[in-house]
Amino acid sequence: MTLADLARGDTAKLDKIDTRDPGVIRLMILGMVEDITVRMENIAIGGDPLEVGFFGSSVSLRKEQARHFKVTRITAGD
Amino acid sequence: MIESTEVKIPVSGIGIRRKARASIALIGNPNAGKSTLFNRLTGLRQTTGNFPGVTVEKHIGTVQLAHNAFNLIDLPGIYSLDGISVDERIAVDVTLGRVPGTDRPSGLLVVIDATHIYQGLYLLEQLLELQLPTIVALTMIDVATANGISIDIDELQNALGGVPVYPMSSISGHGLDALKERLEHITSIPSPPIPASWPDLSETSQQISQQLGPDWQRIDVIQALLQTHPGFEGKLGNLLGQEAVASLRMKLFGDEPPAAVEARKRYQWIRTVITQVQEHAPLYSKIGARLAQWTNRPWPATVLFFAVLLLVFQAVFTWATPMMDAIDGLSSGLGRWIITQMGDNAFSSFLADGVIAGVGSVLIFLPQILILFLFIIILEDTGYLARTSFLMDRVMRSVGLSGQSVIPMLSSFACAVPSIMATRVIPDRRDRIATILAAPFMTCSARLPVYALLIAAFVPDQSIGWMNLQGLVLFGLYLLGIMGGLGTALLLKSSALKGPKPHFMLALPEFRLPNIQTVAIKLFDRGRIFLKRAGTVIFVVAILVWTLAYFPRHEVTTPSAMTTISDTSSQPDMANKRAAAQMEQSWLGRIGRTIEPVFKPLGWDWRVSSAVIAGFPAREVVVAVMGTIYAVGSEADELSLSEKLRSARWPDGRLIFTLPMVLGLLVFYAWCLQCAATLATIRRETNSWRWPIFAWTYMTGIGYFGALVIYQVGSLL
């Protein structure tokens, strides 16, 4: 399961990150690294882009990059 | 924004002004409360300019302390020192003293938002590698408390190896005095120890730098190893041998990108620190986030977005009216008073018709421009502008761009110059250039005077439901600009600037109440720039146009009929004909008639044509030129400019400003690129003449063509 598969309100743990995409590295610099817990805050009209929250911050990204983050769902949202 | 100006207004009462001996760099994440702290510390003792060679804004202020004074260098808000964007590169280069004309700072004041220490600590850990005396200002501590976050300051200082941390609220000023006291002695703070987040990298680099001698600092080696500074990588390889460097890299990063490894290592440490120092780390902050969540739900957000835009346009038109009427009354009254006091002669006409009518006709738009900027500044400071880029990413994707182009385009509604500079956050050059060329289509504040004049003169002031028709027309013109910009982006992205699909990643700030002082300072700054232009460029053009319109004098024009201004109504035809004859044979009239054929297909007479030509350096000049032309050409000085436009006629008696002609003129203004400052900025940002020349030709071309089609088709109907 990847970050792109989460529904709005889901929380999940980031397991493994594919670092070959330069866009992914930018997200890691913003703090999206392995073992943190994230929450899918929002999904825009049409399903893309996504807004992910962690440690009091929100970051928006496209599904294309989100697919490089393998996750384990912790709780399901609404 | 381009010029370097200085404001010195004493805010701290009368005191001895000490000369700044050293500089301190102010650095932190975007939206961490950096500019609020900057304004708190420096008051209005600020200078604005650019760092040499790049368009990153250089903001320097003086901090007056009890015994010392420092220059405070405000650096762009960044998340890391990786040097991916121009902002990041400049921030690193300034702190390391690599920028000519800017002294190497003797200390760092690092701003960390207490509600975002996760990302704040990441930048801090990188900054500690600079080995400069460092103080941390932990801002928004009141917001953190309100959100249920408490931070153990002593514990945090321990984790940072003794780097002093000062909790404070920039809004209330709480904690500022303690910070200032420490700033006084910043140079005596020992340089920070090896940062604990990735000691392997720091220690290895430290050893190498000692080996290599004084030319190499730890940060230089780190940048060479991380490949974040292009020049250093090769140099280090030459000194140590390529193989040694390669094996060092392998040891530190394995076969992964160095930046990814760095993020992993440092954030891992930061997470352990946060669990130690932070009372409870909520997954997301409460009040702001909940509001943001609701307003950011796709449909409410879209409705809200258009509601906000409509509110702005309504406000620009309705709130400003009383003040504009006052300015109008004042300037036309002053003009009349001068003519009655001094009699009608060249000098009184120069003052009344040239200076007052010309500058006054632009000055009148100051209230509207201030209201517009007030909204833009508030939307920016509340974090709303950043939110809209999430909302609009989809739309931008359809023209081949990403949500990252939204902030430049929205701020272009105020002025294209800072918005073109704001495109530097866009990593891909093709996307950046497409955004740069689309941004000048957005209706900037300088178009407002032209729109406002023509709308007030030709659109009836009536209500349709709760909407005002004039406001609706203005809204339509804004839409026209947006369509022009998006169409251009689409055209370029599917032809000359075709490239890979852009990424979109952005840290979204939560809603925040704007700080009144910061908003006031920014607004004051915009007002000052506008007035400065009115006082310089527009003043000179108004005088020039008056001279061209007033000379050479027409023989028949005798002052006898003109001195009795109050009686003009008895013989308006005679007086108007005489004035028109004077205008026709003036230099301006002769020049205007020479170029008239070019614009005649658009329904413009020579007066409109020459006003448009005069407006190419700066479009708001058009209004000033019309103000002067119609003042010199008209007897009835009590009429406002819009009334004069309504009654302007061709020699054969037809009205000049017909509906198709006005609509065409508005379309021309929506699309045409009449701004020397924008062209210069495009030249600087793209580093070539190709793009500004293209932008000018293209925009002027479609503006002309649009006006032509509308006038010709409209006249047939």
Image (cartoon, rainbow, N blue to C red):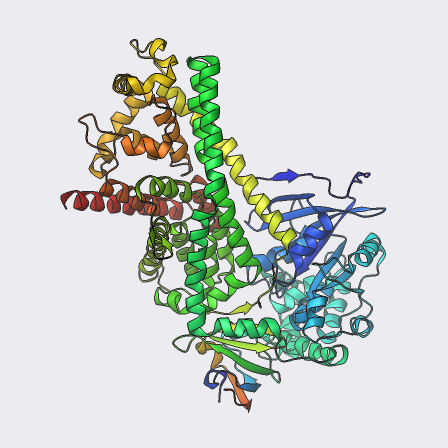
Residue A19: percent from left, percent from top: 53, 78
Residue visible at 47% across and 63% down in the picture:
B404
Q: How many callouts does the rendering have? A: 0
Vertical placement of residue B491 versus B453, above or below: below
Residue visible at 73% across and 40% down in the picture:
B10
Q: Quadrant of residue B311?
A: bottom left
Q: Is residue B477 visible?
A: yes
Q: Nearer the viewer, residue B584 or B34?
A: B584
Q: Quadrant of residue B235?
A: bottom right
Residue B662: percent from left, percent from top: 27, 41
Q: Nearer the viewer, residue B655 or B140?
A: B655
Quadrant location, the N terminus of chain B: top right
| Residue lying furthest left | B716
Vertical placement of residue B257 versus B443, above or below: below
Residue B495: percent from left, percent from top: 31, 60
Vertical placement of residue A74 versus B426, above or below: below
Q: In this view, does B420 lie to the left or right of B3?
A: left
Residue visible at 22% across and 46% down in the picture:
B710
